[in-house]
Amino acid sequence: MRRNLERDAPEDALWDDTVREFSIETNDDEESDDEGSFDEADDYDEGSYDEETDDEIDYNETDEWETEGEYLSRLKILQMKDTKKALTAQLLELEEALPLVKAEHAKFRNRRAASTSRLPDEILCLIFDRLYQKSLWEEPPTEWVLSCVSTYWREVAHNVGSLWATIYLSTRRSTEYIEVYIKRSKSCPLSVTFDICNLRRAEYMAAWTSLVNEVSRWHRLYIFADRDPSFSIYVPLEFVADKSAALLEEIRVELEDYGWTEEFDHPEAFALFGGGAPRLRVLEFDGFMLHACWPVFNGITTLFIHELLPEAMLEDSQFQDLFKNLPSLTSLSLYGDPLKRDYPRGANIVLTSLRALRLRLMTDDLNQKRFPHFWEHLTAPALKTLYLFECRNHDVDKLSDCFTPFPELRPIFPSLRLLVLEDCQFSDRTFEILALEFPSVEHLVLH
């Protein structure tokens, strides 16, 4: 009996394990059914929405089988869509208007914050113009700096024509801004500075053409060059050969020593500003003179001839002709002797209107000292002021020797009242000679 029970035990245990496994599988299936099941009624009550297919539904379309609930919800959807559309349009309008309002707010805030906001525009314009005159060559340009302070200052600065009336054409500034300056300067007289150094013709031609179109407004003309003037200075000046410059008062030409060892060729002569420059008063030549295009000299009152390069110096005939055409000259400055050779014996240059004369010693590249002995051949009965810079003892001795044979010509400058000596290392004897030759001097200044 015990043997039978022991034999049957494994079968009972197998049965129990089978029942247990079946029960576990059944419970898992039921749980799986519970998770995946849904209540159709609940699904219908809550409703479903697919955003991707919403645009495919026409809520304006009616259905004869439509229930009351469907009808009311459809109307509500239509109303909400209309409201959304209106709000979207309003939002776009606000986004477009917001930057404008912000800019206006910044404008008023800048005006309130600036200490000059209470000043009338006319007073601020005068302040800007005065500041500009004191900082013409500063970098960055004053007019640009003033335009960047605030919106208010920018508006005022853009309306001050004189701030934009000095036009500087060179490699340091883009030629594209020329048109902007011409426009903002309005009708103000223009001061044109043309720095041709390292500037190729193709780079400046368009800008120079625009400036030539405004030649009637030119007030000053400065030209700087560093190479053969036949290719640099004369080329742009040919554009104004037959032009009229009614407002032009000053011309300055400067040629730097560029190492040129041969005499350059001057182009065929032409009349600079042949149409007339009635207000031209000042000519300044530094290193070079306009041999081939002399402007009309009749009204010139001030002439500077400084440090002429050897290949640019004048023949005696050119020098004589130059002063014959200067009846109104009142101020003359010579830095170094402008003549290639010594003055011819008996040369006499008469300048009846000359009031001030400046003579300065020049030391060239070969360490040769050139003092302008022009005063030995000058008759200037109205001269009142004489400036001597780095004059030497023998320069004064030479002056005295020239007049010793002609005592009737003394005193040399009968109207001279002021004598200025700068860096002149004179001996006592030289001072005695000066006192003898210039007895009418009332004031002596030593530097």
Image (cartoon, rainbow, N blue to C red):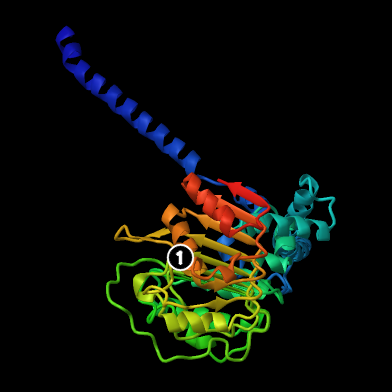
What residue is at 73 percent from the left and 64 percent from the top?
93
Q: Nearer the viewer, residue 324 or 69?
A: 324
Q: Nearer the viewer, residue 122 or 21?
A: 122
Q: Left of 35 or right of it: where is 120?
A: right
* Figure quadrant of residue 278: bottom right
Q: Nearer the viewer, residue 358 or 381?
A: 381
What residue is at 51 percent from the left and 62 percent from the top?
359
Q: Which residue is mark 1?
A: 372
Residue 217 x, y percent position in the rendering:
66, 79
Q: Nearer the viewer, residue 295 or 437?
A: 437
Residue 230 x, y percent position in the rendering:
38, 82
Density class for disc 1 (Cα within 10 Å; few <14, some 14-19, many ≥20) is: many
| Amino acid at dot 1 | Pro
What residue is at 44 percent from the left and 78 percent from the top?
233
Residue 115 x, y percent position in the rendering:
78, 45
Is residue 105 positioned above or below 260 on the image?
above
Q: Is residue 94 visible?
A: no
Q: Which structural element holds mark 1?
A: loop
* Figure quadrant of residue 6: top left
Is residue 294 positioned above or below 281 on the image?
below
Q: Quadrant of the C terminus?
A: top right
Residue 48 x, y percent position in the rendering:
61, 55
Q: Quadrant of the N terminus?
A: top left
Q: Left of 230 or right of it: where is 8?
A: left
